[in-house]
Structure formats: structure tokens, C-alpha cells
Amino acid sequence: MVTDHRSENGRARWSPEFEIELGNFFISRTEILSGAKTNTRRLLKPKGRVEAELYAEFPAVLRQAASRDPDMLPDSSKPNKVLTSMQKNLLASIHAATQYSFNQATEYKTRLDTELERRVQDEVSTHLEKLGLAPGRTSKPARGQHTIADFQPENHEITSIASSTFWQIIEELGFKYTSKIKPHSCPLHDDGPLWELELNQITEKLACGQVSRELSLKLKQRQKELDKKVAHYRQHLLQYETCRAAVKQCENELKFNDRKCVLYRDFVNMYNEKGQKVKNLVLVKLTRNDRNTLDVVKLHNFCTDSKSGCDAFYVADVFDHHLKPEAQGGSGEFDNIDHITLCGDHSTKVASSKTTLNVSISNFSVHIMPIIVVMVRASP
């Protein structure tokens, strides 16, 4: 509930319980490394993704805060008092949860998909505006005023607080965080939906025939560029789907005591509390047990040596350690394995002609069959 008092920087204050719930949301999206000597939290995702997830979880945040602080609810003894935006969001959130078919997980997913789609639309619109292919966007009309007496919660679209306000509250709650992360996203998966949406909008503009000759030439040129990009994106999706199905089949064909496994490998690096990079080559080993389910063993291989890089030689050392029998100083993790189906990253970062021996049958008593899989982080 918005009160009359404000923070030092002039921001309207809400219920302390509401701000605490925002803090709990923030904590769930951050971490402090084990053994760290600082309270600075690591943001696990890009800020934009965290903001989208806040939008998705906002009704649940409001309901939880109101259950702790009933004073957040508007005063029912004053039915003609105008409701604030926060109060309308709160009443609509509570009403939604009372419906017979309500499911909080479904609510979260639906809102997250909607917000991510909205952000994609905004990116496309901004891009078209920069190219001069679309007029500037107009601001949304202000919402009408409502009182408790005439407010219809089932017709209200539950929004969220402004992103800038959220980060301001996090700062005021005393949290310190670092966003020193380097997400390795796939440019095709990230930009492909934007290309498709932009191509559809341009095609519609050309089809209506109500554009000037100069604009028509610009649109056709951009359409030609997008046709190639979208074709590449769709081909990548098909390759991705096909490869993933092939790997899944390898998992399904594993049998109990067949001395075979499927092994995934990839670098999942991080930064320690001092901001230093920690290399981590993760191996995920899958075998079939006597209950006909998969046993999953994750092997984390850390390295903090600043002179060592994430390269094929580092990978070779890790494989040498794990594939070597325990009796010879190895980890022994693969002593009962004769055949490995190796999946994951096969780029030059993890394999080269100089280290082929380290993943071959001639160096270990294990047959290794690599499967070239289209990675999420494919390059266009």
C-alpha cells in the first residue's frame, strides 16, 4: 500500500512486507559462493531476464506480502475512495487465485511468455524505427480511475512495478550485487524470432500497397536480407531438433550393466568473490541402473590458474585423469565403462588434432564415439 511518507530520494514507499518479498525474489535469482568473504551477491541471469521473471511472479509476490500485512488491502469502509495502481494489482492477484482452475505455475509461465514476447516486439519496433521503416510509438493512454465499489478485478491486467524502481528498492534494502557474468547465448536462437517478426511486419506493409516508392525500396531491400537470415535460423532449428533427438535415442538405448554411458561435456565457468575467473569443465555421465532409470553423475573440474585457458589441452588433461584407471592414478569414474557416447561441445576450444590421442581407443581401454551436436550457441 502506498503511504504518504517517501524515501530519501523521493520514491513512494510501500508496505515493508512487500519490499521484503521483493528482496526474497532477488535472493532467489542470486547467490553467494561458498567460502566467499563478501556479502556481494552474484546475479545469475541478465538483468532483463530477471525483470521479466519479476513481471511473471509479481501476482504471487503481492499475495504473499498481503498475507503478511493485511493493511496492504484497501479500506473496505471507504468504498468510494479511488484505488491506486498497486491496490488494483493486489485485488486482481487475489481474485485470480480464488478461481477454481487457478494454478500458480501456469500463471507464472503464461505471464513470463507474455512479457518475453512483449520485449521481443519492443526490440523489433525499436529496430524498425531506427531504420526509418516505422513511425515512432505513442504512449499508452492513462488507465481510468476506479473505486472499490466499481472495480472489476477479473478485467484488470496485472502489471508490475517499474524496473528502475525494483533495482532502487534492492539497493535501499542493503543488497550489493555484481552482474559480472558472461552469458553465452545463441545468436540464432536469440535473434531468429526477431527476424521472423520483423519479416512478417515488412511483408504486411508491402502487401497493403500504401507506402511511398522510396519506403517500398527500403522495405524490399530489408526483406531480402531477412529472407536469408530467417532461412538460416529455420535450418538451424531443424538441425538442433534432429541432433537432440539422436542424442536422446542414445540415452534410451542404454541398458543396465552394458558398460556403456552417454557423456556430455561443456565449460561452465564462473567468477569467484574476488572477480577472478574460475574455469570449470563439467562432465555429465549417464548410465542405466537396475530400475531402468538413468543415473546421472556430474563431474566438475575446476581450475583457477590464470595461465591456463579453456582449451583442448585443458580438456585433454581432464580426460586423461578420468579415463585412466584408478589403479594408475586416475579417478576411476570410468573403470566399469567400455563405450562412451560423447556429446556436447566439439569446437576447437575442446578438441584439436594435437589432443586426439587423449580421446581415442589407442590411449585408453575405452571406445569413445563422439556425436557432433548442433549447439545452442551456434554462430550464424
Image (spheres, helix red, strand yellow):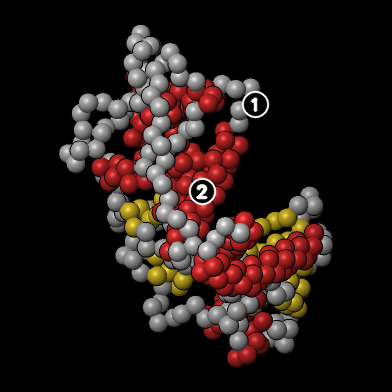
**Residue highlighted by disc 2:** 118
Q: Seen in the image, is 88 located left or right of residue 255? A: left
Give the residue displayed 67% in from the left and 69% down from the top.
231
Q: Seen in the image, is 50 located left or right of residue 357? A: left
Q: At which x and y percent is residue 176?
A: 29, 51
Q: At which x and y percent is residue 1?
A: 33, 25
Point out the residue furthest to the left here: 8
Residue type at tag 1 = Ser
Q: At which x and y percent is residue 134?
A: 48, 58
Residue closest to the eye, 354 or 24: 24
Mark number, residue 210? none
Residue closest to the eye, 228 or 17: 228
Let me know if residue 74 appears in the view.
yes
Q: Seen in the image, is 91 located left or right of residue 251? A: left
Against 263, residue 308 (above or below) is below
Against 194, residue 148 (above or below) is above
| Distance (Cα) linking label 1 and label 2 | 25 Å
Give the residue displayed 54% in from the left and 24% down from the top.
154
Point out the residue furthest to the top here: 77
Give the residue displayed 41% in from the left and 16% down from the top.
148
Residue closest to the eye, 176 or 367: 176
Q: At which x and y percent is residue 51?
A: 43, 47
Give the residue displayed 76% in from the left and 58% down from the top.
288
**Residue highlighted by disc 1:** 101
